[in-house]
Image (cartoon, rainbow, N blue to C red):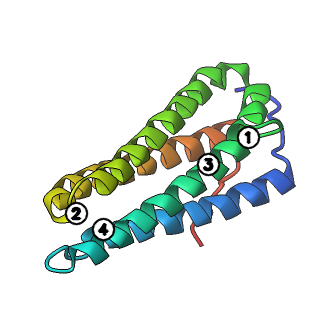
Amino acid sequence: MTDNPMTLDAVLLDELRRRRAELRESLSALEMALAAPAGNGHERWAERVHVALVELAADLRLHVTLTEGPGGLYNELREADPRLSRAVDGLCAEHVRLHEDLDDLLLMLDTAYPSSVAEAVRHGGNMVLGGFARHRQRGADLVYEAFKVDVGGET
């Protein structure tokens, strides 16, 4: 870390916190949808899970734009300390994997009879939730390392 760390732009920080909170809401919606009983109302269960996955995928796309896009967080991190580039590259790779995992779950719901895939979708969904939790923590730790700022966003 540099001796004189850069300051994270206040507008970017506010947007990061807002998006982070929205992403957390989408993760909670997916968690609740997956936990609901599939039982006799498996079509309703599959629909709730599908809606939650689509919402989460949209929030992930916004997150990627905010972090990887021009003037985004990851450019700021690389400028704050070039040694962070490897960690930033890892976060970018995680974005790709998270998108792929969400796409796989959506495809599973779209191509199979919901009651026959409920257990597989639940398992995959819980793996995705865990992946997001780890990604969010690594990102927050990296921002704190570079800027001594807690991105929070949990309110």
Q: Specify the amino acid type for callout 4.
A: Ala
Give how far apart the Cα atoms at labels 1 and 3 are.
14 Å
Mark 4–mark 2 CB contact (< 8 Å): yes
Mark 3 surroundings: few (<14), some (14-19) or many (≥20) residues within 10 A: some
Q: Which quarter of the figure is the C terminus placed in?
A: bottom right
Residue displayed at 83% across by 31% down? 4
Mark 4 surroundings: few (<14), some (14-19) or many (≥20) residues within 10 A: many
Sequence-wise, the earlier of marks 1 and 3 is: 3
Return the residue at label 4.
46
Mark 1 surroundings: few (<14), some (14-19) or many (≥20) residues within 10 A: many
Sequence-wise, the earlier of marks 3 and 2 is: 3
Disc 1 secondary structure class: helix
Return the residue at label 2.
114
Q: Specify the amino acid type for callout 2.
A: Pro
Give how far apart the Cα atoms at labels 3 and 4 are.
22 Å
Return the residue at label 3.
61
- Horizontally, is 39 left or right of 122 in the view? left
